[in-house]
Image (cartoon, rainbow, N blue to C red):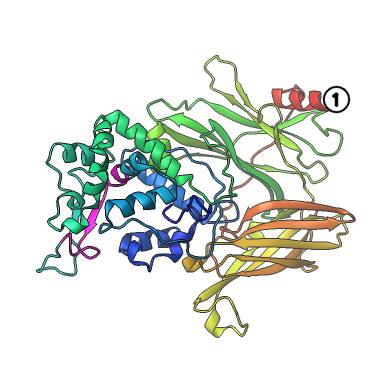
């Protein structure tokens, strides 16, 4: 946020921090370790700047603070931004002007500092002029906490007001460095006193930290607020596994932590054929039950834990006949308590399988890690990289198609030290050595990346039509855990999902 300039619209939450860690204003191990921890997570959909925002939200929730709303859509830069991070030695005029350029007035500056300093402290290795090292163990940093608790609370404020504070940025004998004191008393302690109420502090911190995380360069538009869905389909894909064509999906349901999980609950997936006599569920509706149920640990996310929920996952794997395929699907949840079963059908639209012409086959694909030093290819943009990954990927294309082109677009921004993002296209060729399976033939190709989180879009061009399977992860390939598909049942009844779809299609 400190790089933002409201006058020219540059800087803000754009991920530039990772290129600014050698600046005096950003020194210290904490930021470097955090940047390293975040290297794996950025991808084509979630930017590095979004990951940093999510990390801040999780940190606040973990330590007992408010749940900060999240909007996505931040855009990464690959260069350092403006200078301007406030430093302890700055006078109040410099500090106030720094925050003004970032878009915050005096009261908001005070709130940001109070909320930011409710946790953490000052380290002797970063600021020995504030916190002297221990002469007996000089290699072990001494940390002086801002207040007497490790929680996200208003002790940093109340202890300042009652005179018991241990915050060295307030009470240090080095008066040049007492920046918190200068900021807190800049309006006669009026704003600090307003934060002495516990709930007011939590609410004000939620709002001002939201503002901070939504400070982005001019021209960047964030998404609507992303909220927790009571039910969510977390993935849906056709696959070839053990020489069988299958469809895999997962229904995730929220469960109250202080509630009782109903072990009698049954969850059923229904679907309509894409082709054949039963197209659009005109004859029968197919169904299956989960092959696996997975209960997430409530601690998997500090935000959902704070909201009082954990997740139950219902994994479905069903065999598919390629002559019938699958067009749309939905779920029915029966608690077996006499209540009407709930239908989850995407608001009546059902969950759509938009095409079955091409799909990525992780279980038939693999990846090799290759040392740049022993590989003959010269990389002009990978200087200093020890290894890169060579992906050997397999795409399944419907057997009756005669495509003019089969290819992938790859994107990987999870590169060490965030030096660049890998982006490219690779053409695939028909592999005649691989026999067709389940009505699909196989095209193979390679893609090289020095990152760790490659996403691909698979395309097949037939005439003037291009079919695409987008945003497929390569995280788990030939070591994909195998689970046998479930049993398929047929039912002539019109379910809520089938009826809502058919009624929209029929006149």
Q: Is residue 192 above or below residue 391?
A: above
Q: Where does the image place residue 11, in percent across and percent down from the top left?
A: 50, 55
Q: Who's the residue at 71% across and 66% down the image?
A: 425
Q: Who's the residue at 25% across and 64% down the image?
A: 126
- Extreme residue in the right direction: 463
Q: Is residue 174 above or below residue 155?
A: below
Q: Where does the image place residue 365, in percent across and percent down from the top left?
A: 65, 63
Does residue 415 appear anywhere in the picture?
yes
Say which of 81 and 494 sits in front.
81
Quarter of the image holding residue 153?
top left
- Extreme residue in the front direction: 93
Q: Is residue 229 above or below residue 353?
A: above
Q: Who's the residue at 56% across and 56% down the image?
A: 43
**Residue matched to label 1:** 506
Judge whether residue 22 is colored magenta.
Answer: no
**Position of residue 99 in the picture relative to residue 290 (left or right):** left
> Magenta: predominant secondary structure element?
loop
Say which of 325 and 197 sits in front.
197
Does residue 39 appear anywhere in the picture?
no
Q: Where does the image place residue 180, in percent across and percent down from the top left?
A: 24, 48
Q: Is residue 322 above or below residue 475?
A: above
User: Range of the magenta residues?
Assistant: 113-131
């Amino acid at each position: 946020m400190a790089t933002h300039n409201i006058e020219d619209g540059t800087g803000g939450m754009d991920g530039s921090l990772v290129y600014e860690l050698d600046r005096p204003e950003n020194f210290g191990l904490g930021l470097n370790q955090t940047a390293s921890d975040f290297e794996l997570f950025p991808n084509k959909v979630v930017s590095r700047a979004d990951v940093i925002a999510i990390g801040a939200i999780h940190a606040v929730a973990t330590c007992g603070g408010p749940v900060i709303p999240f909007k996505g859509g931040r855009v990464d830069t690959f260069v350092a931004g403006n200078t301007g991070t406030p430093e302890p030695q700055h006078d109040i005029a410099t500090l106030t002007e720094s925050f003004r350029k970032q878009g915050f007035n005096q009261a908001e500056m005070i709130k940001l500092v109070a909320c930011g300093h409710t946790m953490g402290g000052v380290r002797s290795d970063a600021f020995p002029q504030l916190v002297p090292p221990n002469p007996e163990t000089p290699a072990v940093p001494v940390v002086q906490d801002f207040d007497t608790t490790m929680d996200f609370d208003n002790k940093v404020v109340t202890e300042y007001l009652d005179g018991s504070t241990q915050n060295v940025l307030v009470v240090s004998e080095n008066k040049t460095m007492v920046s918190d004191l200068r900021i807190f008393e800049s309006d006669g302690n009026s704003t600090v006193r307003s934060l002495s109420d516990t709930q007011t502090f939590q609410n004000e911190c939620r709002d001002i930290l939201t503002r901070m995380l939504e400070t982005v360069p001019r021209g960047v538009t964030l998404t609507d607020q992303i909220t927790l869905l009571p039910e969510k389909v977390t993935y849906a894909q056709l696959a070839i596994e053990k020489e069988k064509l299958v469809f895999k999906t997962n229904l995730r349901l929220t469960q109250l932590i202080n509630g009782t999980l109903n072990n009698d609950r049954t969850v059923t997936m229904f679907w309509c054929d894409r082709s054949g006599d039963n197209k659009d569920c005109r004859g029968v509706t197919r169904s299956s039950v989960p092959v696996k149920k997975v209960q997430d640990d409530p601690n998997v996310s500090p935000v959902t834990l704070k909201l009082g929920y954990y997740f139950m996952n219902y994994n479905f794997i069903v065999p598919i006949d390629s002559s019938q395929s699958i067009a749309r699907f939905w779920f029915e949840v029966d608690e077996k308590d006499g209540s009407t079963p709930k239908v989850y059908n995407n608001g009546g639209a059902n969950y759509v399988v938009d095409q079955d012409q091409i799909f990525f086959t992780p279980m038939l694909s693999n990846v090799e890690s290759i040392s740049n030093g022993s590989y003959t290819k010269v990389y002009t943009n990978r200087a200093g990289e020890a290894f890169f990954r060579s992906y050997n990927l397999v795409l399944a294309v419907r057997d009756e198609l005669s495509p003019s082109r089969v290819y992938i677009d790859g994107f990987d921004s999870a590169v060490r030290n965030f030096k660049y993002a890998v982006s490219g296209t690779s053409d695939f060729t028909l592999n005649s050595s691989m026999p067709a399976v389940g009505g699909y033939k196989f095209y193979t190709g390679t893609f090289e990346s020095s990152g760790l989180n490659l996403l691909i879009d698979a395309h097949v061009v037939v005439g003037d039509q291009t079919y695409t399977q987008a945003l497929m992860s390569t995280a788990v390939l030939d070591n994909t855990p195998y689970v046998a598909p479930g049993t398929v049942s047929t039912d002539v009844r019109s379910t809520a999902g089938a009826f809502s779809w058919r009624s929209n299609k029929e006149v």
